[in-house]
Amino acid sequence: MASSNLVRAAFFAVGAIVGGGVATAIGAGRRKEVIQPSPPSPPIVDVQPTGVARITAPGALTRVDLPVLKYGNPGPVSDQLVRKAYFAAYDRRLRHPAWFSQTAEHLTLASLGKSPLGQPPADEAGDRSKSTFIEDNSIPAMFQAKLKDYFRSGYDRGHMVPAADAKSSQEAMNETFLLTNIAPQVGEGFNRHYWAYLEDWCRRLTSSFADVYVFTIPLYLPKLEADGKWRVSYEVIGTPPNVSVPTHFAKVVLTSKPSSPSTPHISEIATGAFVLPNAEIPDNARLESFVVPVEAVERAAGLTLFSDAIKSSSKHICKSTKCEVIVRRFDDAQKRKAIAAPKN
């Protein structure tokens, strides 16, 4: 896809998720009972003035006890997965992660093994060559993504939380290879290239900020068709069809650092969101061309990532640091192995 066409596609995606909305009306006269509106959901990450982050799992505190559910609750909406290096929610219908940070990832120099004080012993650090993709048996079998779903699908098994972010131990790295941390991604030009550059950019933020929170969110965005109507269309891989292929992926970041040497207890917060199409992206595409408002991603994903106070007071990440990826074509020297046929 040409760079100019790609940018236009990105703008279409922004328009779809910024302008999309549904107006609903309830006829109060038709009902005798009074239905109280649900309280607004708390933000997933709320950073206090001291820099301490308060993290809430969406829906984790919700308890439903109604007569209609006497014989069972058809939920959960998503499975909450607590891992060594990340926290995630798994979508049983789509068979891939619903979203990620420590509510997906909390990155620091220490967590990445780049701090002299935080480096694990060499024999305990995660080694990617010792990890293999594996089905997640913590999910009921009928809702699992399977290794065979990806075989000859034409898509890479794309990490939502990168293996390179989980070098603290072999167990932490192995957990990033669970299929509950994987979504189908275009390989050439995306998972192996531009998406990998963006993951690297997120890790490099730890050189400038004390704390970095990263959310990775698969999205299904509408596309304007020739008849003037917006439609969501996506592929489903597997035989029988089992795993949905997202149309886009979002990276949302929140960073914090002391506002000044004289006020180390007061944090300077920066936030930013990027939405990329699940397609080949040229290396020369500007990262800032994929910038969207955080609220746009929240609306598209059905999440409240940050509090209104953070959104109104934080700087944009591209004004706090350079939003530029570094092109590193590691696979030019050593092409990735094709996905092998599953043994089971």
Image: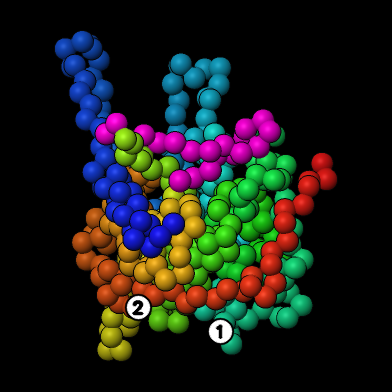
Q: Which amino acid, by three-letter code, is at mark 1? A: Ser
**Mark 2 closeness class: few <14, some 14–19, many ≥20 residues within 10 Å:** few
Look at the image and tell me in which quarter the C terminus lies.
top right
The tag on residue 322 is 2
Name the residue at the left extreme: 29
Q: Secondary structure at mark 2?
A: loop
The residue tagged 1 is: 115
- Asked if one can make out residue 224 in the rendered structure from this viewpoint, the answer is yes
Please provide percent x and percent y for residue 303: 37, 46
When asked about the image quadrant of residue 266, the answer is bottom left
Q: Is residue 100 left or right of residue 21?
A: right
Residue at image position (43%, 53%) is 277
Q: Is residue 104 left or right of residue 52?
A: right
- From where the camera sits, is residue 198 visible? no
- The secondary structure that most of the magenta stretch takes on is loop
Q: Amino acid at mark 2?
A: Lys
Q: Position of residue 101 (x, y in %)?
A: 48, 59
Q: How far apart are the alpha carbons under marks 2 and 1?
A: 22 Å
Mark 1 burial class by Cα count in 10 Å: few <14, some 14-19, many 20+: few
Q: Which residues are magenta?
A: 227-247
Q: In the rendered view of the protein, which quadrant contains the N terminus?
A: bottom left
